[in-house]
Amino acid sequence: MAGPITTASLTWTRDLQFDARSGQAALVIDSSGKAGPSPVEALALALAGCMAIDVVDIVQKGRHPMKGLSASLTAERAPEPPRRFVKVDLHFVVEGDVPASAIQRALQLSRDKYCSVWQTLRQDIPFATTYEVRP
């Protein structure tokens, strides 16, 4: 039995820019990263977004009083083509009275089970996640 299907369409507009659409969402993909994210920047956003959604969902289901969450991702790329990610660091700042154990559990569940973006990437990439809690 197949899982959910994801579709995406791109239409070349000019230079190395494309109008991109997936479901109801639309954005511009731009090789230079000026009119919209480049494909690699979009991948970084997808990874950070996937894990951030998981963390918020898991912490809220645990009934912890989260007031806010922000994430910042830094990815090192190989110097030669295909210039893939060779290392990723993703840092979360959680606001609210959330125990460290709840955040650690959410991060582990996201990495090991729920984040489809991470599970799609090469598993030999060093990937560090860190966090801090601000009341």
Image: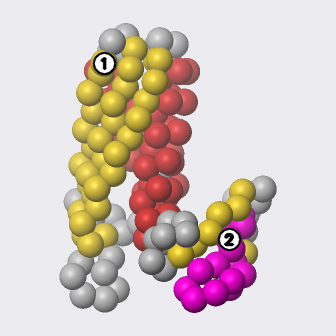
Which residue lies at the image location 41% right of the left edge and 35% below the top edge?
70
Which residue lies at the image location 36% right of the left edge and 69% below the top edge?
122
Residue tagged 1 = 134
User: Where is residue 81, by image quadrant?
Assistant: bottom left
> What's the magenta region?
10-22
Q: How is the image coloured?
A: secondary structure
For mark 1, does the 10 Å Cα neighbourhood hold few (<14), some (14 to 19), or many (20 or more) residues?
A: some
Residue 13 lies in the magenta stretch: yes
Residue 80 lies in the magenta stretch: no
Circle 1: residue type: Arg
Q: Is residue 48 above or below residue 95?
A: below
Badge 2 element: strand
Which residue lies at the image location 30% right of the left edge and 21% below the top edge?
133
Asked if residue 124 can be seen in this view, the reply is: no
| Left or right relative to 131: residue 30 | right
Residue tagged 2 = 20
